[in-house]
Image (cartoon, rainbow, N blue to C red):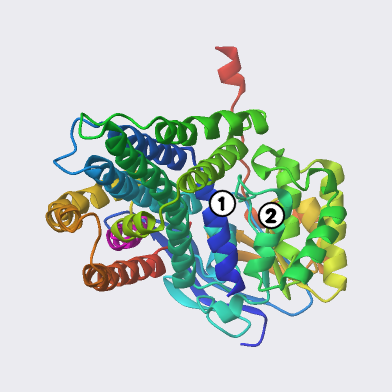
Amino acid sequence: MKGFKAIFTATLLEIACDPLALLITLSALALSTFAGALHYHQFGEPSRMAREAGVSALLIPGLAFAVFSSIRAIRREMESGTVQMALAHSVSRAGFLFAKMTGVLAAFSIFFATVWANSLVAVKGSELGALAANGDIARVWGPSLALGVAAIAVPPVLGAILNRFASLRFVRTATFLALFISLAGVFYKFDSALALRQLGLSLAVFPPVIFFIALAGAAAVRLKGNSASALSFAVMALALPVLGAHYLPDALENGGSVPLGYLSLSFAAALPLAAAAFLAGVGLFCERDLT
Amino acid sequence: MNGIIELKGVSKTFRDFWLRPTVKAVDGLDLTVNEGEIFGLLGPNGSGKSTTIKMILGLLRPGEGEVRLFGLPPSDPAARKRLGFLPELSYLHPFLTARETLLYHAGLCGLDTKTARSRANELLEMTELVHAADRQVGGFSKGMARRVALASSIIGKPGLLILDEPTSGLDPVSTDEVKTLVKTLAKGGMTILMTSHLLGDAQDVCDRFMILNKGRSVAEGRVDAIGSSLQEYFLSKIGERRDFKVAPFLAQ
């Protein structure tokens, strides 16, 4: 258990120090902030654009975050040789892989909390903007846009200054600053019903993410980074139409909330697939010589 | 079989992507390392030392033969419970500090938090890294990284310590410190298997040795029984010298 905790924590820290993960997080924040501020396309429903942008920011960059983080976390261990140090202890290969994948899932949860909080601010701003416009063309709600922009711009600048431009520490600080600033924005005109609805809607991102973490991790055990990415994105290209057909329309037709039964069904479908991908990864890893 | 490490007729052939054999790194090796001794696995570059060690650690699977570690196959995590390993290159996570690296390895050894912290502090003092304890190891010099890796390998107070080229990349003072450390650990009851091609270091430290060449054992015995310097003995057993013909190159 202590071995699991050590590998899990190191993986979480590793992704928090990964510039690519930070870049994807900031891009997702930009998508949820700026697309949500476009008030000319509400699809006949106040805040619908912001809501849709928020979920898209969690799904598309979220899947990219999950795939790249999973592959990089495992490939770096293989290529730098640190996996040899870990497996020289009483850690099984299956345990190692499980700890790495759960570490990636924990890092994704930080991404999720950051982008979810930011999208909630955008949705709230969109609703307030529609109210203030009083039936006219909705206007951008200033404070909410300012909070979104602060979550994107302040972390890299402040992180760099605080760490005197030291690369690894700067990325780690910026990642956590983005989380804290986004979460702080939630408390601006806090609306618990809206927060819960937006959370339920966003949680539907987790089932595909869990599956793709397992798939990308399993591929990375055997394939080099580029090949593992290509394989994961090919599977994603096949699966996205299925996700697109069920998930956004379902959510949006229900006034921005996802029924609990739908969420349970998504998890019930994704978990066996993720388990199958994980077991395939363990099989490949156990057969593999670590030179 | 009753040594801590036992290899019987072990061979390892590396293969390419299409499973065609590329190189036979180890060929029919028999090896026993007994409790409490310092055993030196010696040989020139490419003789199969690191491959042998990786098979003992369970990182490589032997093609033929049997490997036992504490009486168990090395793929069994229970066999590696009392093991410390220092690889030839200091494989460290660059984003962790020296202290975090030691705590990471303490976690892998299953130590509780209090013990882990106290041992990490002791080892940071022992390796004179207290001043750099909270700096990320990605920015360390080769020698400092080597000291962190060495401290990581012994934080669990293992019963068996495997050192792959432990003095590689160290200056003479640090090399001497490592040799003293190895002897002290062995006196404390630790069994040590080390590889080296620095024969002077091996002669100073090891009780027994095996010389490998082209994946096969060419000599084995006690260091104090060879009656000459290990260097001369080694060259007589390897039986070949590389003579780089540099004069014609310089003359052109």
Pick the residue in front: A256 or B2: A256
Residue at mark 1: A13
Residue type, numbered disc 1: Leu
User: In front here: A137 or B164?
Assistant: A137
Quick check: can you spot residue A93? yes
Q: Position of residue B179 (x, y in %)?
A: 83, 56
Residues B241 and A157: in front is A157
In the image, which is nearer the foreground, mark 1 or mark 2? Answer: 1
Question: Residue B100 shows which numbered tag?
Answer: 2
Residues drawn in magenta: A203-221
Image quadrant where residue B64 sits: bottom left
Q: At numbered mark 2, what does the secondary structure look like: helix, strand or loop? A: helix
Relative placement, left or right, of A138 versus A290 is: left
| Mark 1 in CB contact with mark 2 (< 8 angstroms) | yes
> What amino acid does circle 2 point to?
Glu
**Marked residue chain, label 2:** B
| Residue B53 in view in this figure | no
- Chain on which label 1 sits: A
